[in-house]
Amino acid sequence: MSSIANMGGTDGWGRATAPTPDEPVFAEPWEGRAFAMTLLTMGRISGRNLDAFRHALGSLDREAYLDDGYYGRWLNAAELMLTDSAIIAPGAVDARVRANQGESVEQPPAPEQDAKPDYKPTAAGSLRTVEEAPRFAVGDRVTAKDVDPTGHTQLVGYLRGRTGVVTIIQPAALLPDTHAHFQGENAQHVYAVEFDSRDLWGPDAEPFTLTADLFDSYLEPA
């Protein structure tokens, strides 16, 4: 699906600021707690994996994704994973916050039964071994498919239908499109593909090379 995370090349988001060399890992103490809470939520509590977390991030609206900052969106995605797994009821976090601020708020009842995915990976991490040889070689020209899947995908919108050149054959990995929805690991070869910025955003774009890691099923021969 096209998500808020696929904002590359679009206007209206304001100026992007580069981080300073001495930027701390966590600018404020709550950010470290948000990081830990999200990692705990992702696996042990909600039963959801890294790709499901990325899908949750991409499912957020503009306010939840941008206005609360980087670790704010992590917390918003963690809440979404908890509601998707029926660990908490929709609106429960907002009701608790308002109650803690002194409002008289009726909190939604807790779900009667959780909906955690019945899923176990075949091995640790995301890298896998694929027996068949890669379809593409370094130097091949490839085109990213011009598709908009209904579910999760790591094929960002600004690359769809664009042509680039394979520069590296990466280790094979789990396909996020199925793994995020617990529909199988579907491990595939991954290719680093270079694109010219002007092929992506027009002749007036600042000239540079963009490299993206793309799964085999995202690509077709140019």
Image (cartoon, rainbow, N blue to C red):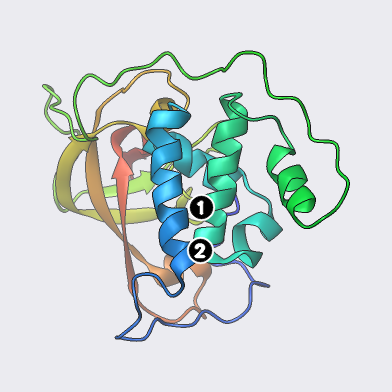
Q: Are marks 1 and 2 in contact (CB under 8 Å)?
A: yes
In front: 64, or 3? 64
Residue 138 point in image, percent of width and height: 14, 50
CA separation in Å, label 1 and label 2: 7 Å
Quarter occupied by the C terminus: top left
Residue 148 point in image, percent of width and height: 56, 38
Three-letter amino acid code at the position of disc 1: Trp
Residue 213 point in image, percent of width and height: 29, 50
Residue 174 point in image, percent of width and height: 29, 31
In-image side of 170 versus 54 (left or right)? left
Quarter occupied by the N terminus: top right
State the residue position of label 1. Answer: 74
In front: 100, or 183? 100
Element type at mark 1: helix
In-image side of 191 versus 37 (left or right)? left
Q: Residue at x 68, y 51 (%)?
A: 61
Q: Residues within 10 Å of mark 1 (few under 14, many from 20)?
A: many
State the residue position of label 2. Answer: 70
In-image side of 194 versus 67 (left or right)? left
Q: Residue at x 69, y 24 (%)?
A: 110
Element type at mark 2: helix
Q: Residue at x 19, y 30 (%)?
A: 124
Name, please, the residue furthest toward the right: 104
Q: Can residue 6 be seen in this snapshot? A: no
In front: 56, or 7? 56
Q: Residue at x 66, y 14 (%)?
A: 112
Three-letter amino acid code at the position of disc 2: Tyr
Image quadrant assignment for residue 130: top left
In-image side of 62 versus 195 (left or right)? right
Q: Is residue 28 above or below residue 39?
A: below
